Image (spheres, grey):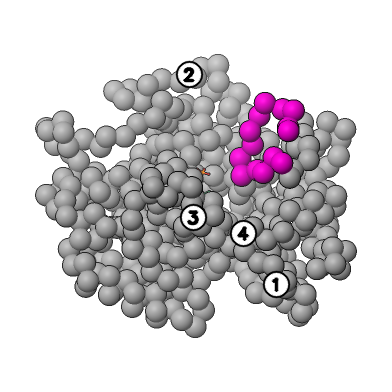
């Protein structure tokens, strides 16, 4: 039995030794109390963009914290939220006109689903209730987000709570048409009943860092438009430069009806999320009838400290060469991947922007593969934080990662199969 009273997320305590205690962090590094330096090659669950404890973001917390800590956001507003709202409007594609705040990726997605359903309900088209999702998707761990995600071992126990959805196949390279044909068929079979499609653009993260072409995204958006289906882009993981552009949807030249973002919104420093939507979604809720309002809130909606950090983050994007740093990381990841691509111990080397992934060629695959914990322990011993998804290892570091750090990460990775006897 574990001696600690703390229950950690996605952790089988019976198999896990001591948790690695982290005392402080800077740039791409985490430090233990005895000063062991660990390279954070997964940006601490994909949230850290510029680096840990990034100066301008830390300063924003300090400035805001003694001024206004928290205020109820119903009936009230404040400068950090308003400044962030304005800054976001300058950054996101035109057509995303309204911003709703929440505090995690999951809540941003829950809000998106409720907005889509509320939209149709308020338009008097309450029969539009079906949600279409993509195979292998992950949108979070709340009941609603699990419902629109892949079903598997991680949510089997909770299946009585999950609502039904319609699933289109993942667009495996070469079979992209099957995905768009499946969506078209669903819209014919359930004419006038589909409320929304929710999708992770370009990269399905927790589903295994599965990547697909921007043309698919464009096709799916066009098909949704043909039947007025609300197109929800979950950019919780892909946003803030991870795929090479600020948002992944830009690469398909599409503007979703609803966009969810969190993680990199604050550069990873504070929990905050926003769900942006088209004006018409807001308008459907705008009425003198109180029964038509958007029924959603959480205690910390638009927390001023988190908003101040997110605003500071928008200014970092505006004033610093963040895009150059991203471009440099994209090409450095590519150089390393090229070497692994020719190595038979690895397969499916793939990259989307700053995200690189590779499968270790083994028969024991899938989320519960015993390879994952073995690899995790091995990487820990190499002082690299990598958390494989089954036999898939992905590298998603903060943009400040140095060449030497990347060399160290890929050195550990390329030695893994031999040292672990895989
Ligand atoms: C695409 C996507 N959506 C939603 C979420 C849920 O975000 P959070 O863990 O902040 O609730 C995640 C988390 O990894 C994600 O990758």
Q: Is residue 313 visible?
A: no
The reply to whether dot 3 and dot 1 touch (C-beta < 8 Å) is no
Cβ–Cβ under 8 Å for marks 4 and 1: no
Q: Earlier in the sequence, mark 2 or mark 1?
A: 2
Q: Residue at x 73, y 45 (%)?
A: 15
* Circle 1: element type: loop
In the image, the residue with mark 3 has its CB under 8 Å from the nearest atom of ligand 1 = yes
Q: Is residue 343 above or below residue 75?
A: below
Mark 2: secondary structure: loop
Q: Is mark 4 within 8 Å of ligand 1?
A: no
In whole angstroms, how far apart are the C-alphas of marks 2 and 1?
Answer: 55 Å
**Which is nearer the N-term, disc 4 or disc 3?**
3
Q: Spot the residue most to the bottom.
A: 174
Q: Earlier in the sequence, mark 2 or mark 4?
A: 2
Residue that carries the numbered disc 1 in the rendered image: 363
Q: The N terminus lies in which quarter of the figure?
A: top right
Q: From this viewpoint, is residue 132 visible?
A: yes
| 259 over 355 or under it: above or below | above
Q: Are marks 2 and 4 in contact (CB under 8 Å)?
A: no
Residue 370: x, y in percent?
Answer: 72, 59
Mark whose residue sits in front, 3 or 1: 1
Q: Residue under label 4, please give it.
A: 367
- Mark 3 surroundings: few (<14), some (14-19) or many (≥20) residues within 10 A: many
Separation of marks 4 and 1 at Cα, in angstroms: 13 Å
Q: Compute the Cα span from label 2 to label 4.
A: 43 Å
Residue 68: give its label. 2
What's drawn in magenta, residue-wise? 1-14
Q: Is residue 82 above or below residue 213?
A: above
Q: Which mark is residue 138?
A: 3
Q: Secondary structure at mark 3?
A: loop
| Mark 4 residue crowding within 10 angstroms, few (<14) / some (14–19) / many (20+) | some
**Residue 335, x across and y down, in percent:** 74, 71
């Amino acid at each position: 039995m574990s001696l600690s009273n703390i229950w950690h997320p996605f952790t089988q305590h019976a198999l896990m030794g001591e948790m690695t205690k982290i005392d402080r962090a800077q740039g791409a590094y985490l430090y233990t109390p005895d000063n062991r330096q660990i390279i954070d090659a997964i940006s601490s669950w994909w949230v850290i963009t510029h680096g840990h404890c990034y100066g301008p973001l830390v300063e924003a917390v300090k400035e805001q914290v003694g001024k206004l800590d928290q205020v109820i956001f119903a009936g009230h507003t404040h400068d950090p939220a308003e400044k962030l709202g304005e800054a976001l409007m300058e950054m996101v594609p035109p057509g995303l006109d309204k911003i709703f705040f929440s505090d995690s990726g999951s809540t941003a997605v829950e809000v998106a689903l409720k907005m889509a359903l509320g939209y149709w309900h308020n338009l008097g088209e309450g029969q539009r209730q079906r949600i279409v999702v993509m195979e292998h998707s992950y949108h979070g761990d709340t009941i609603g987000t699990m419902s629109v995600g892949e079903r598997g071992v991680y949510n089997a126990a909770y299946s009585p709570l999950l609502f039904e959805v319609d699933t289109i196949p993942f667009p495996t390279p070469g079979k992209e048409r099957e995905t768009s044909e499946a969506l078209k068929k669903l819209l014919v079979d359930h004419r006038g009943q589909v409320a929304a499609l929710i999708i992770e653009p370009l990269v399905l993260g927790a589903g295994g860092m599965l990547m697909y072409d921007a043309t698919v995204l464009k096709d799916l958006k066009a098909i949704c438009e043909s039947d007025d289906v609300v197109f929800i882009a979950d950019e919780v993981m892909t946003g803030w430069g991870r795929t090479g552009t600020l948002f992944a949807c830009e690469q398909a030249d599409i503007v979703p009806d609803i966009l969810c973002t969190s993680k990199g919104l604050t550069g990873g420093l504070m929990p905050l999320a926003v769900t942006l939507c088209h004006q018409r979604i807001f308008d459907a809720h705008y009425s003198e009838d109180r029964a038509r309002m958007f029924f959603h809130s959480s205690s910390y909606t638009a927390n001023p400290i988190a908003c101040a950090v997110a605003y500071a983050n928008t200014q970092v994007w505006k004033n610093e060469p963040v895009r150059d740093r991203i471009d440099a990381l994209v090409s450095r990841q590519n150089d390393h991947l090229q070497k692994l691509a020719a190595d038979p111990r690895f397969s499916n080397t793939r990259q989307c922007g700053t995200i690189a992934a590779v499968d270790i060629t083994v028969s024991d695959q899938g989320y519960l593969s015993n390879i994952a914990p073995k690899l995790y322990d091995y990487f820990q011993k190499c002082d690299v934080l990598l958390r494989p998804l089954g036999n898939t290892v992905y590298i998603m570091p903060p943009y400040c990662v140095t060449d030497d750090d990347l060399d160290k990460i890929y050195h550990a990775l390329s030695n893994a199969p031999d040292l672990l006897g895989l």
